[in-house]
Image (cartoon, rainbow, N blue to C red):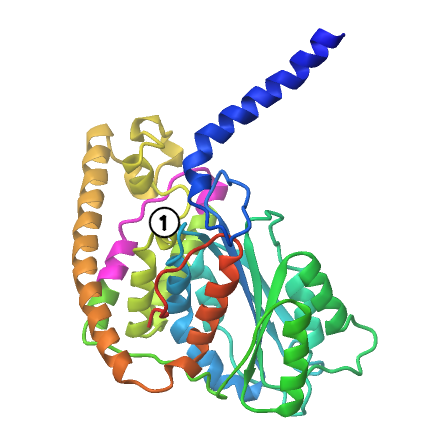
């Protein structure tokens, strides 16, 4: 019995020692001030939910969010290691309005999230407090948060009116915020405008959920700089969308059709500047995963995860099914070559856009009071506790 016990103890110890030797270079590079995190088999995640007041007074802020969401996502991607980013939305108003809350669950497909954001309109409200308690409850309880302890999970509460504290049949924010903190979900509270009562509640929410409070102007004070390169960048980005070839079962293709439809709507309805910011995001490692998603043939063949010859005809992209084997190979190569060409031109133009924006930003006032600046610096500080490192100190514009 003693020999068997020794063997049972010795084998796990041998495996653990081997793993420690294998990962030692990674562990050695972890800053001493950072709590060591488990080594994840996939990229660390950032899970970000915006709980956004969509009543009538919030029109300017909603417009700013539509313009800057890709810039905010781009800023988040600058972390080392490059994260997988998932974004969700909770729109809220009040009882008696068209809705109390509308929840969009976390998704790594930022285009689809953006298409949902395009539908947000400022309406209703006007009578003081709003259903903040319901919004926070949904953001904590009705979002598919991961249980990964290495993930950075955060809610940005954005609004200008305090919560209804007289709706006694719903959980109230002190309880919800404390529960969020227990689950490792940070809540940052962003005040739009200067309502003193809202500020008091927002500060308490942020304090209870280990987050930050900051205030922006009623319109969000977002610094959105248009450039002479934006329209061409938007055109190239749309061309890049057209190189995507999705394959798989009928159910898989139904999902990717929604992804393609979201991009088509974005290219039709979003401003050229917003589409240029999307292009910059999509060229990052994190953004490329969002842009192409799963089951994209050009990417999967390029990285060796699938062979064109191994895909059954019914699961091929529809455009390739009538082709013979040689035609399919030639078509795939043409899409690959076109993607490479578009990416080269995009990188050149985005470098010029960055230089243009940087020069203009230096001459601009109020950047530090802007919505995107506050969000970026909250993420930079809080994600650092999860092992993410940022070397850039300015958000993408």
Q: Is residue 143 magenta?
A: no
- The residue tagged 1 is 292
Q: Is 132 placed above or below 389 here?
A: below
Q: Is 249 placed above or below 114 here?
A: above
Question: Does 148 sit left or right of 120 as displayed?
Answer: right
- Where does the C terminus fall, quadrant-wise? bottom left
**Foreground residue, 215 or 244?**
215
* Residues in magenta, as a range: 236-253
Question: Does 353 sit left or right of 196 as displayed?
Answer: left
**Foreground residue, 265 or 93?**
93
**Foreground residue, 17 or 369?**
17
Task: Please report the residue visible at 72 percent of the width from the left and 65 percent of the height from the top.
Answer: 178
SS of the residue at dot 1?
A: helix
Task: Please report the residue visible at 72 percent of the width from the left and 73 percent of the height from the top.
Answer: 173
x and y percent of residue 315 in the render?
40, 35
x and y percent of residue 381 in the render?
49, 65
Task: Please report the residue visible at 47 percent of the width from the left and 43 percent of the height from the top.
Answer: 252
Question: Does 397 sit left or right of 252 as displayed?
Answer: left
Task: Please report the residue visible at 44 percent of the width from the left and 29 percent of the height from the top.
Answer: 22
Question: Does 357 sit left or right of 311 as displayed?
Answer: left
Q: Is residue 252 magenta?
A: yes
- Examine the image and state in which quarter residue 306 appears: top left
């Amino acid at each position: 019995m003693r020999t068997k016990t020794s063997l049972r103890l010795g084998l796990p110890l041998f495996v653990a020692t081997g793993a420690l030797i294998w990962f030692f270079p990674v562990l050695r590079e972890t800053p001493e001030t950072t709590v060591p995190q488990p080594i994840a088999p996939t990229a660390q995640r950032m899970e970000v939910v915006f709980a956004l007041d969509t009543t009538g007074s919030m029109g300017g802020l909603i417009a700013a969010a539509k313009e800057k969401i890709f810039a905010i996502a781009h800023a988040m991607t600058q972390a080392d290691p490059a994260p997988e980013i998932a974004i969700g939305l909770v729109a809220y108003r009040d009882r008696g309005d068209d809705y109390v809350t509308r929840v969009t669950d976390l998704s790594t497909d930022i285009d689809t999230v953006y298409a949902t954001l395009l539908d947000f309109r400022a309406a209703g409200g006007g009578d003081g407090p709003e259903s903040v308690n319901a919004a926070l409850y949904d953001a904590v309880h009705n979002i598919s948060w991961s249980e990964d302890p290495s993930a950075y999970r955060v809610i940005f509460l954005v609004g200008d009116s305090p919560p209804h504290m007289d709706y006694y049949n719903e959980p109230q924010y002190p309880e919800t915020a404390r529960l969020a903190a227990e689950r490792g979900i940070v809540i940052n509270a962003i005040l739009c405008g200067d309502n003193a009562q809202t500020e008091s509640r927002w500060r308490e929410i942020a304090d209870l959920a280990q987050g930050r409070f900051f205030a922006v102007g009623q319109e969000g004070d977002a610094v959105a700089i248009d450039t002479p390169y934006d329209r061409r960048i938007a055109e190239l980005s749309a061309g890049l969308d057209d190189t995507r070839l999705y394959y798989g079962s009928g159910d898989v293709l139904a999902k990717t059709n929604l992804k393609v439809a979201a991009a088509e709507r974005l290219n039709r309805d979003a401003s050229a500047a917003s589409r240029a910011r999307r292009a910059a995001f999509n060229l990052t490692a994190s953004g490329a995963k969002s842009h192409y998603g799963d089951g994209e043939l050009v990417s999967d063949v390029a990285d060796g995860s699938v062979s064109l010859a191994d895909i059954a005809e019914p699961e091929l992209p529809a455009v390739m099914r009538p082709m013979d084997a040689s035609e399919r190979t030639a078509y795939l190569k043409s899409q690959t070559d076109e993607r490479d060409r578009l990416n080269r031109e995009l990188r050149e133009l985005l470098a010029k856009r960055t230089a243009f924006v940087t020069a203009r930003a230096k001459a601009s006032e109020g950047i530090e009071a802007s919505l995107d600046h506050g969000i970026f610096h909250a993420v930079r500080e809080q994600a650092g506790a999860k092992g993410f490192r940022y070397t850039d100190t300015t958000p993408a514009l």
